[in-house]
Amino acid sequence: MAKNFLRFGVWNINRLNGKLNDTDFLSKINHFDLISLVETWLPYGNPDVHIDGYCSFSKCRKEKSLSSRRNSGGITILVKQSLRKGVKFLDKGSNEEFVWWKLDKTFFNLTSDIFVCSVYIPLQNSSREIRLNTDHFENLQNYIHKFSVLGDVILCGDFNARTGTLDDFTHVDPFLNEGNLSTIIVSKRFSRDLNTNCYGRSLVELCIENNSVALNGRTKGDLTGQFTCNTYNGSSVVDYAIVAQELFLLINSFTVDYPTEFSHHSCLNFVMRIKTPKHPNVNMEVLNKSISFVWDETKKQDLYDVMS
């Protein structure tokens, strides 16, 4: 393992089947070391995804609405084969809206294990949400409480949460905090989407409670909070990458791609620095005697020619 950076992708793909043979789509996927694809619409019981150079893990919805002609939801994680030994998928039978996976601190030479949650939360007033009648953010909080004591947490995906420019962190006075190195000062977040909804307010509360911040709108590459979803009835920011404040300092960049023909959601990209592993010990023979050189006056001109 000799990488200095990990390239993450997060993308609501609006159906995966039919795109796996598209060279432009595959070229985009190959840009990433690890990518979360949500709304894959893969059928339950047959979720295999084969892309050269990657290992995959998929979670699909067990139920399909009787009135629907297609599957819905679904999350697939793609991991470069060279990194597979450093990734472990967790709670495989848990909530269909989340996939938790761990980046091993030893393999990636990190200070702590990182627990990543790939998220797809349906629209607030969708028929599925009304039928389930569950609080996704409370469920998410319970998982964060479980994993945050074991390492750092990253949340990424489509939350269908419109946060506007609501603060997602507690303001700290830099003068009062002077000398307290344990507190990380983050900048205010900007967003082109000024609207909020119930899920958005729940998401910023979740961030504040867990000392986490969104990369959108405050990170090099996206300092304005670009729209992540563009449809016939408007544009919005609903897709996020959210990291523990301790990890924020390791984020090199975050970008929102331009919309493509593959989805009305943009692909999110973020790059995280990882420590370069130490070189393995090299056996060296140590001479127990000094080496001396004898000067040859006749070689003086040769030395001058080489040095000039």
Image (cartoon, grey):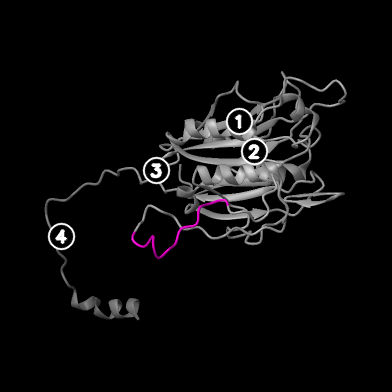
**Is residue 300 found left or right of 271 in the rendered image?**
left
Please state the horizontal and vertical placement of residue 223, each as a whole percent of the image. 62, 61
Q: Disc 2 marks which amino acid?
A: Ser
Depth check: 70 or 240 in front?
A: 240
The kind of secondary structure the magenta stretch mainly shows is loop
What residue do we see at 68% from left, 35% from top? Answer: 120
| Among numbered discs 3 and 4, the one appearing first in the sequence | 3
The residue wearing badge 3 is: 111
Viewer-side label of 2, 1: 1
Element under disc 3:
loop
- State left or right for residue 105 relative to residue 242: left
The magenta span reads 168-179
User: Mark 4 sits on what residue?
Assistant: 291
The answer to whether 245 is drawn above or below residue 69 in the figure is: below
Q: Indicate which label's residue lies in the foreground, 3 or 4.
A: 3
Q: Disc 2 and disc 3: Cα gap in Å?
A: 23 Å
Of the residues under marks 2 and 1, which one precedes in the sequence? 2
Residue 304, picture quadrant:
bottom left
Contact flag, marks 3 and 1 (Cβ < 8 Å): no
Task: Name the amino acid, label 4.
Answer: Ile
54 or 120, nearer to the observer: 120
* Whether label 2 touches label 1, CB < 8 Å: yes
Mark 1 residue crowding within 10 angstroms, few (<14) / some (14–19) / many (20+): many
Q: Which image quarter holds the C terminus?
A: bottom left
**Residue that badge 2 annotates:** 36
Q: CA distance from mark 4 to mark 2?
A: 59 Å
> Residue under circle 1?
99
Q: Spatial distance from mark 2 to mark 1, Cα to Cα?
A: 9 Å
Q: Residue at x 21, y 46 (%)?
A: 285
Tell me the SS state at disc 1. strand
Q: Position of residue 44 (x, y in %)?
A: 73, 20
